[in-house]
Amino acid sequence: ARAYYRRAQRDCGEAIATCPEPYARALLRRGVSRLAVGDAAGAQRDAAAALEAAAGDGSKKASERRDAAQLDRDRVFLASAIRDLGAAARPLDGAGGIAINVKAVADARARVASLQPAAGTGTLAEACACLAEGDGERAGPLLD
């Protein structure tokens, strides 16, 4: 899947480079593909450029402005989910270990995966998702 998104970024980049005026739709598509592989900063730049390119009037421009705003909301949602993923583990008092909120990790993993289908969330998050689903057999090898 990652190769698909990289190819989309390349193709949109070529369309943007050859178009005589800013190409908002290609910027949006490249931004979505960047977000899917974890490049939130690139997605934000493309969303801002698409908003600027779609600043004129007209229904097509209005659609592009809506899509650019949605891309930016998705970027913020993803950043929040990644923060939640990191906050789901906390040190145990004086024991030198870590307590993990399995449900919080599984929920944050699902949120990240909804916007970053090509990016992995790590074996611990995968194991927590299995545990949250009650599938200890699948979780075991991931935790070894």
Image (cartoon, grey):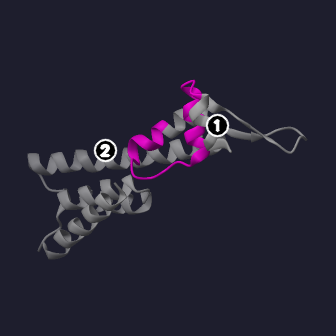
Q: CA distance from mark 1 to mark 2?
A: 38 Å
Res. 10 visible in picture:
yes
The amino acid sitting under disc 1 is Gly
In the rendered image, the quadrant that contains the C terminus is top right
Residue 68 x, y percent position in the rendering? 27, 51
How many badges with numbers are in the image?
A: 2
Indicate which disc, 1 or 2, sits on the residue closer to the N terminus. Answer: 2
Residue situated in front as seen by the camera: 84 or 97: 97
Residue 101 x, y percent position in the rendering? 67, 32
Q: Is residue 117 magenta?
A: yes
The amino acid sitting under disc 2 is Gln
Question: Does residue 11 appear to the left or right of 88 in the view shown?
Answer: left
In which quarter of the view is residue 46 placed? Answer: bottom left
> Can you identify the residue that label 2 sits on?
70
Residues in magenta, as a range: 110-135
Residue at image location 25% in from the left, 56% down from the top: 28
Secondary structure at numbered mark 2: helix
Residue at image location 34% in from the left, 54% down from the top: 1
Residue at image location 43% in from the left, 57% down from the top: 40
Q: Is residue 119 magenta?
A: yes
Residue situated in front as seen by the camera: 14 or 123: 123
Question: Does residue 51 appear to the left or right of 83 in the view shown?
Answer: left
Residue situated in front as seen by the camera: 58 or 44: 44
Residue projecting furthest to the top: 134
The residue carrying pointer 1 sits among few (fewer than 14), some (14 to 19) or many (20 or more) residues within 10 Å by Cα, namely few
Disc sitting over residue 140 in the figure:
1
Question: Does residue 16 appear to the left or right of 84 in the view shown?
Answer: left
In which quarter of the view is residue 98 placed? Answer: top right
Residue situated in front as seen by the camera: 52 or 64: 64
Secondary structure at numbered mark 1: helix
